Amino acid sequence: MQTIEKYNFAGKKAFVRVDFNVPLDENFHITDDTRIRAALPTLKKIIADGGSVIIGSHLGRPKGVTDKYSLKHILPRVSELLGVDVQFAPDCMGEEAGVKAAALQPGEALMLENLRFYAEEEGKPRGLADDASDDEKAAAKKAIKESQKTFTKKLASYADCYVNDAFGTAHRAHASTALIAAYFDVNDKMFGYLMEKEVQAVNKVLTDIRRPFTAIMGGSKVSSKIEIIENLLTKVDNLIIAGGMTYTFTKALGGNIGKSLCELDKLDLALDILKKAKENGVNLVLATDAKIADDFSNDAATKIVPVGEIPDEWEGLDIGPESEKVFADVIKASKTILWNGPTGVFEFDNFTHGSRTVGEAVVEATKNGAFSLVGGGDSVACVNKFGLADGVSYVSTGGGALLEAIEGKKLPGIAAIEG
């Protein structure tokens, strides 16, 4: 498989799929340029080699052309960070895009307008009536798949080589994230530096495991994490269940959880997970105490109680000190750590302590030689909020992509390069 480090881009045009889906305020100012900065090493390598760059990305989830999601809003910041006056093609399929791409000189860069302005990027029909018949839906799907081939081929025609540096969209079999790779020779398609790091980090926690291996799974719903949990039960030594999922497990075990978050239809599933953990020799760790509140508010009255003894009008919003110590002890003794999801409602400062304690334990274990991967939006927000990001081995930029990789799925964007 080709690697970006070994590839010489001199005199070549590279189509680089990035993830510049950055947050914008009401005045279209970027509020967090992390994703742009993450792609800079790849873009700068191509330019430094004497190549030219054609940047493709999406922004938001548009259902057609709309100014709100135009990449022109981020063009000045991309130019500033890249150190090159990046040109812009206002229509990724328009004649101007082809002309500008063909005219690119070594060291120059061109950014295409939002790829998702075209339904062909995602390969899903738009504008179908709610009462469309099955035949109409089937015909629309067939039509979009056919036009998607033309769309993909046109994008590929702009360049001599293809670089995928958008791990955040690697789980999507979209035109620019997976299908386009088929138009390039095996030696002319590769991962960018960011994508390489993401793939290596995932492989490290799922295949190159040093034990003990501990996964910390937070989040509100067992149902949204079930495939991840089931895959991890065949790999980890310790599985810490945290966040809102805690109370579904507690309820299933007969505890009183007040008005805490709970999936009543998943109680049997929780018991099944406990059974599978025992059968696989996995130490499944649940909270034993909780910081509860009489309202879902930062200013609510609080107290610490056993996790299965929460009064009717109260709800658990974080773990308690006893659970913090148990979680931290398990984490500190680990050599491979995966953290996905906080222990409580960390958005409220009054309920951050559990997540902070977990984060600090992950950092301490990392200092002692553990490999730690933090992924999923809330976990990333946690380590950033607490200033702990530099203390872990790797912070993933991919939310859904990381979760599907952990589930054991082969991501289309990765398979398109690796074969």
Image (cartoon, grey):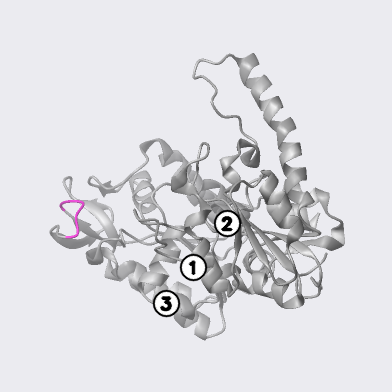
3D distance between C-alphas at marks 1 and 2: 13 Å
Q: Earlier in the sequence, mark 1 or mark 3?
A: 1
Q: Is residue 209 left or right of residue 188?
A: left
Q: Say whether residue 45 is visible.
A: yes
Q: Is residue 398 magenta?
A: no
Q: Secondary structure beneath disc 3?
A: loop
User: Which residues fall within the magenta stretch?
Assistant: 294-298
Front residue (pair 307, 82): 82
Q: Is residue 25 left or right of residue 94?
A: left
**Residue carrying label 3:** 388
- Which-is-in-front pick, marks 2 and 3? 2
| Residue in view at x 50 percent, y 78 percent | 333
Instruction: Locate residue 38: give its quadrant.
Output: bottom right
Q: Main secondary structure of the magenta part?
A: loop
Res. 168 mark: 2
Res. 34 mark: 1
Q: Are marks 1 and 2 in contact (CB under 8 Å)?
A: no
Q: Is residue 16 left or right of residue 319?
A: right
Give the residue type at disc 1: Thr
Q: Earlier in the sequence, mark 2 or mark 3?
A: 2
